Image (cartoon, helix red, strand yellow):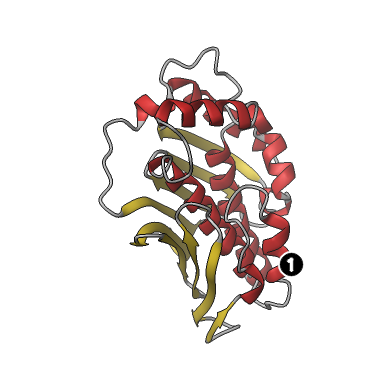
């Protein structure tokens, strides 16, 4: 096999002081290296400083503060504010990396529930069960879940590092086909995908997916929906179309995101390479 492209992402959320945390997402790929960072208040999640940097790539070098994000809550529902503040940014990676940083901060809330106003871990659990109901495999099947979130993370202890996430997509040419592998591993979940695609059309001919780690066995069932993508040119699917094919709220958001990452990298290759 001939390696064509690698893309790696890392998101980390760290305590940066008595009243603040910092989230950073860095992307390093064959064609670029860039990062998005957010300094937020530990209690309110209000953004105190947002920064976008390109170290290597066609739109760089760049190092700039995103003033339009000051005061925005780095939480669910912040998408419109992110899009507006980054609308003048020429780099296509700015919005997804800043969004990924917000997601990391939301995940880190698990270890900041008291600072966020919750009495205990059970209260925080109940809040998520209500707010996130029907949104993913776990929260669409609470009647079947045997492991509560608070029990799942009970063995973890944090010493300033609140959350870590690694993602990788690798694409190689294998004769008349493309071979692609994608993985995601964070503080709570782990996904592995292996795929084979037609070299000329980008149509998916083989798809294997496994959830190696998650809060409950019910989450693992979502891997089987990956077969719904067979016969499709996944690089041409929108994120909404990808989610629908992978069962939407009955699927796994982490599997959906990992397939979407793979599709975006494939799209770059198919646009830029004449096979």
- Say which of 219 and 36 sits in front: 36
Q: Is residue 55 above or below residue 23?
A: below
Residue 76 placement, left or right of 101: right
Question: Which residue is situated farthest in the top direction here?
Answer: 143
Residue that numbered label 1 is attached to: 84
Residue displayed at 43% across by 22% down: 148
Where does the image place residue 203, in percent across and percent down from the top left?
Answer: 67, 47
Q: Is residue 223 above or below residue 22?
A: above
Residue 215 visible in the current orientation:
no
Residue 139 visible in the current orientation:
yes
Where does the image place residue 193, in percent across and percent down from the top left?
Answer: 48, 42
Quarter in which the N terminus is drawn:
bottom left
Q: Quadrant of residue 100?
A: bottom right
Residue displayed at 55% across by 31% down: 128
Image label count: 1
Where does the image place residue 108, in percent across and percent down from the top left?
Answer: 43, 47
Which element is circle 1 on? helix
Structural crowding at the residue carrying mark 1, measured as other residues with C-alpha within 10 Å and reported as few (<14), some (14–19) or many (≥20): few
Where does the image place residue 133, in percent across and percent down from the top left?
Answer: 63, 26
- Say which of 208 and 165 sits in front: 165
Q: Is residue 268 above or below residue 143?
A: below
Question: Which residue is situated farthest in the bottom direction here?
Answer: 61
Residue displayed at 52% across by 79% down: 54
Residue 200 placement, left or right of 36: right
Quarter in which the C terminus is drawn:
bottom right
- Say which of 129 and 249 sits in front: 129
Residue 245 placement, left or right of 144: right
- Say which of 53 and 260 sits in front: 53
């Amino acid at each position: 096999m001939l390696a064509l492209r690698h893309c790696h992402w890392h998101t980390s959320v760290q305590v940066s002081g008595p009243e603040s945390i910092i989230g950073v997402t860095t992307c390093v790929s064959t064609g670029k290296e860039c990062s998005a960072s957010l300094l937020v208040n530990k209690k309110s999640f209000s953004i105190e400083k947002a920064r976008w940097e390109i170290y290597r790539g066609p739109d760089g070098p760049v190092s700039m503060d995103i003033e339009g994000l000051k005061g925005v809550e780095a939480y669910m529902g912040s998408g419109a504010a992110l899009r507006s503040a980054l609308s003048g940014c020429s780099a296509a990676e700015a919005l997804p990396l800043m969004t990924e940083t917000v997601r990391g901060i939301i995940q880190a809330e698990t270890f900041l529930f008291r600072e966020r106003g919750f009495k205990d871990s059970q209260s925080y659990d109940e809040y998520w069960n209500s707010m996130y109901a029907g949104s993913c495999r776990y929260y669409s099947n609470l009647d079947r879940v045997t492991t509560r979130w608070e029990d799942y993370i009970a063995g973890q202890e944090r010493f300033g590092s609140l959350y870590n996430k690694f993602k990788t997509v690798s694409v190689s040419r294998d004769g008349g086909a493309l071979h692609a592998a994608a993985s995601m591993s964070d503080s709570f979940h782990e996904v592995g995908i292996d795929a084979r695609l037609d070299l000329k059309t980008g149509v998916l001919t083989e798809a294997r997916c496994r959830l190696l780690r998650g809060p409950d066995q019910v989450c693992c069932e979502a891997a089987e929906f990956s077969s719904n993508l067979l016969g499709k040119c996944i690089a041409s699917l929108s994120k909404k179309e990808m989610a629908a094919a992978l069962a939407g709220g009955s699927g796994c958001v982490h599997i959906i995101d990992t397939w979407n990452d793979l599709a975006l990298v494939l799209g770059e290759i198919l646009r830029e390479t004449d096979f």
